[in-house]
């Protein structure tokens, strides 16, 4: 059952990741208490924030391919409230900054 819970949460996050969603909102949409949902996610080695940030960074990766799209705008468009939080989450997940990621993509595609 916990796998099904996570899929419900992932679908909710996929739909609303660009908005300022919370664990409370997501748990309510999935029909669980925030405590239960937090426990289920933790039991599967993740957290609500991790799932949300992973989804937002996945979207940002695609947008970073457009050189004319400012990094700050991408951060806001994928749901981050600040560029600092975006940069920190991006580095944590991808191992580089968004600007470094963009430069690596540019270098790969110029070969």
Image: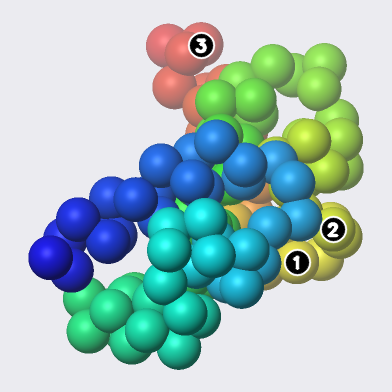
Horizontal relation, residue 89 to residue 46: left or right: right
Tags 1 and 3 in contact by the CB under 8 Å rule?
no
**How many residues crowd mark 1 within 10 Å: few (<14), some (14–19), many (20+)?**
few
Label 1 and label 3: CA atoms lie apart by 30 Å
Q: Which mark is residue 85?
A: 1
- Name the quadrant of the C terminus: top left
Q: Residue furthest top?
A: 110
Discs 3/2, front: 2
Look at 68% across and 58% down and name the residue there.
21
The residue indicated by pointer 3 is 110
Q: Dots 1 and 2: beta carbons under 8 Å? A: yes
Residue in front for this viewpoint, 51 or 74: 51
Query: What secondary structure is marked by label 2?
Result: loop
| Distance (Cα) linking label 1 and label 2 | 7 Å
Q: Earlier in the sequence, mark 3 or mark 2?
A: 2
Q: What residue do we see at 86% from left, 35% from top? A: 73
The Cα–Cα distance between marks 3 and 2, rounded to whole angstroms, is 33 Å
The numbered disc on residue 81 is: 2
- In the rendered image, residue 64, in percent from the top left (x then y), is placed at 65, 29
The answer to whether the residue labelled 3 contacts the one labelled 2, judged by CB atoms less than 8 Å apart, is no
The residue positioned 51% from the left and 48% from the top of the image is: 13
Would you call the spot at circle 2 few (<14 residues within 10 Å), some (14-19), or many (20 or more)?
few
Q: In the displayed structure, would residue 104 be above or below residue 43?
A: above
Q: Mark 1 or mark 3: which comes first in sequence?
A: 1
Question: Position of 66 compared to 82: left or right?
Answer: left
Q: Nearer the observer, disc 1 or disc 2? A: 2
Q: Nearer the viewer, mark 1 or mark 3?
A: 1
The one of 53 and 1 positioned closer to us in this rendering: 1
* Other-residue count near label 3 (Cα within 10 Å), few / some / many at <14 / 14–19 / ≥20: few
Question: Percent from the top left, x then y, of residue 63?
Answer: 64, 25
Asked whether residue 103 is in view, the answer is no
Q: Which residue is at the front of the view, 5 or 45?
A: 5
């Amino acid at each position: 059952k916990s796998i099904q819970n996570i899929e419900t949460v992932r679908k909710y996050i996929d739909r609303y990741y660009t908005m300022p969603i919370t664990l409370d909102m997501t748990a309510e949409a999935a029909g669980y208490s925030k405590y239960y949902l937090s426990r289920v996610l933790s039991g599967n080695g993740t957290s609500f924030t991790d799932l949300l940030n992973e989804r937002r960074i996945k979207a940002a990766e695609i947008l970073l391919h457009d050189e004319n799209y400012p990094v700050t705008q991408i951060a806001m468009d994928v749901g981050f409230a600040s560029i600092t939080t975006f940069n920190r989450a991006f580095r944590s997940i991808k191992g580089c900054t968004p600007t470094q990621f963009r430069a690596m993509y540019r270098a790969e595609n110029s070969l």
